[in-house]
């Protein structure tokens, strides 16, 4: 029971303290400049389009399946 209360207190403290720490970190990060060189260059990856194509193909296969699979056991 004591561990449960201690864990609950720890969770409550972290929930209260997290926004304060995030706000302090955001204030420091807002003052840092961003590099703008190569900002105009657009580079695309191949992973997300390939994943989207695979998902579309699998979705079509699931929609086409009639569901007429018969069980192998009697």
Image: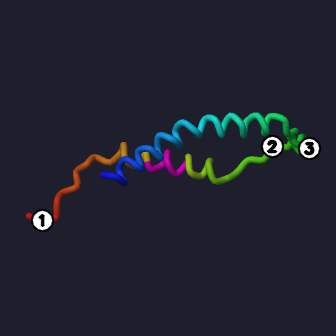
- Comes first in the chain, label 3 or label 1: 3
Q: Is residue 16 magenta?
A: no
Horizontal placement of 12 versus 53: left or right?
left
Image quarter (top left, top right, bottom left or bottom right) of the C terminus: bottom left
Rendered location of residue 12, percent (x, y): 47, 40
Residue 19 against residue 70 in the figure, above or below: above
> Which residue is rendered at x = 52% and y = 39% of the image?
15
- Quickly name the residue at label 1: 73
Outermost residue to the right: 37
Q: Are marks 3 and 1 in contact (CB under 8 Å)?
A: no
> Which residue is rendered at x = 73% and y = 47% of the image?
44
Which of the two discs, 2 and 3, sits closer to the camera? 3
Q: Is residue 55 magenta?
A: yes
Residue closest to the eye, 71 or 15: 15
- Quickly name the residue at label 3: 37
- What secondary structure is the magenta-colored segment mainly? helix
Residue closest to the eye, 74 or 32: 32
- Comes first in the chain, label 2 or label 3: 3
> Which residue is rendered at x = 51% and y = 41% of the image?
13
CA–CA distance between discs 1 and 2? 56 Å
CA–CA distance between discs 3 and 1? 65 Å
Q: Which mark is residue 41?
A: none
Q: Secondary structure at mark 2?
A: loop
Horizontal placement of 70 versus 44: left or right?
left
Q: Which mark is residue 42?
A: 2
Magenta span of residues: 53-58
Horizontal placement of 22 versus 61: left or right?
right
Residue closest to the eye, 7 or 46: 7
């Amino acid at each position: 029971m004591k561990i449960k209360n201690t864990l609950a207190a720890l969770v409550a403290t972290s929930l209260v303290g997290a926004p304060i720490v995030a706000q302090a970190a955001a204030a420091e990060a807002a003052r840092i400049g961003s590099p703008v060189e190569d900002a105009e260059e657009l580079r695309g990856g191949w992973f997300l389009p390939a994943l989207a194509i695979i998902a579309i193909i699998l979705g079509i296969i699931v929609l086409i399946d009639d569901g007429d699979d018969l069980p192998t056991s009697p």
